[in-house]
Image (cartoon, rainbow, N blue to C red):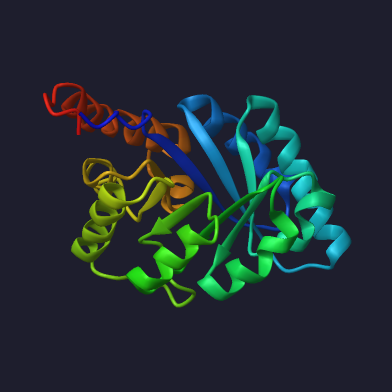
Amino acid sequence: MTPPRPPQRLYLITPHLDDPTSFAGDLEAALSAADIAAVLLRLAPADERMLINRAKAVAAIVQRRDVALLLEDKPELVARAGADGAHLTGIEAFAAALVLLKPDRIAGVGGLHSRHDAMLAGESGADYVMFGEPDRRGNRASFETILERIRWWAEVFEPPCVGYAASPDEVALLAQAGADFVALGEWIWTHPTGPVGAIETASAALVAPARERANDPHGA
């Protein structure tokens, strides 16, 4: 009998922030709405000191709730900003960042274009891999391909995987495929019900797959 995986959790992604103060209210409310494992902070371009100050402002909100703060593609700022780690795009960027992050910080990776890249990331010590996020031009693989990749990873590998939900309808399907975490795209911040409503709906969508696993006699 295969031991059950831990309960699935949500992973939030911020817009590209240039003013954390104006975003603080939405972020506080979002973190109160459900069980959030991590926040991926995307920073708008600025000089290094400004980027660090913005990250520290967000860290003050996130970390007091025991939620991990990750910086997108800025591993060199993680320690000085007091963040918990970084999310890297692509296997090359991930490999280059390891010396800055390991062993004390989280090193996650997305932008993996093949199974081979994902396997390399896992073998190199990735704390998680992400599947399904759009590239810088807004393109992503077909949703069926994303689900297939998550199923494959969940069946074969121990490190957790994050499935990127580009809409509310994708959350339950990613969870059913075996994603350990479901990342909610920027749509949550502009959702008609507001971020709290969007996150509550997404959190509820994780319950059914968890119930199905609990009732599976094989423990899958």
Decide: is 195 above or below 75. Answer: above
Depth order, front residue of 15/155: 155
In this view, the residue farthest toward the front is 1
In this view, the residue farthest toward the right is 49
> In the picture provided, is 120 more to the left or to the right than 69?
left
In this view, the residue farthest toward the left is 217
Q: Residue 208: name its quadrant.
A: top left
Could you tell me how many numbered marks the image carries?
A: 0
Decide: is 23 above or below 18. Answer: above
x, y percent for residue 177: 22, 47
Residue plotted at (84% across, 68% down): 47
Residue plotted at (24% across, 32% down): 2
- Specify the quadrant that holds the N terminus: top left
x, y percent for residue 125: 55, 55
x, y percent for residue 108: 55, 55
Residue plotted at (32% across, 33% down): 201
- Specify the quadrant that holds the C terminus: top left
> In the picture provided, is 170 more to the left or to the right than 22?
left
Depth order, front residue of 13/114: 114
x, y percent for residue 211: 20, 24
Residue 134 appears in the figure: no
Depth order, front residue of 206/4: 4
Residue 113 appears in the figure: yes
Depth order, front residue of 69/116: 116
Residue plotted at (21% across, 41% down): 176
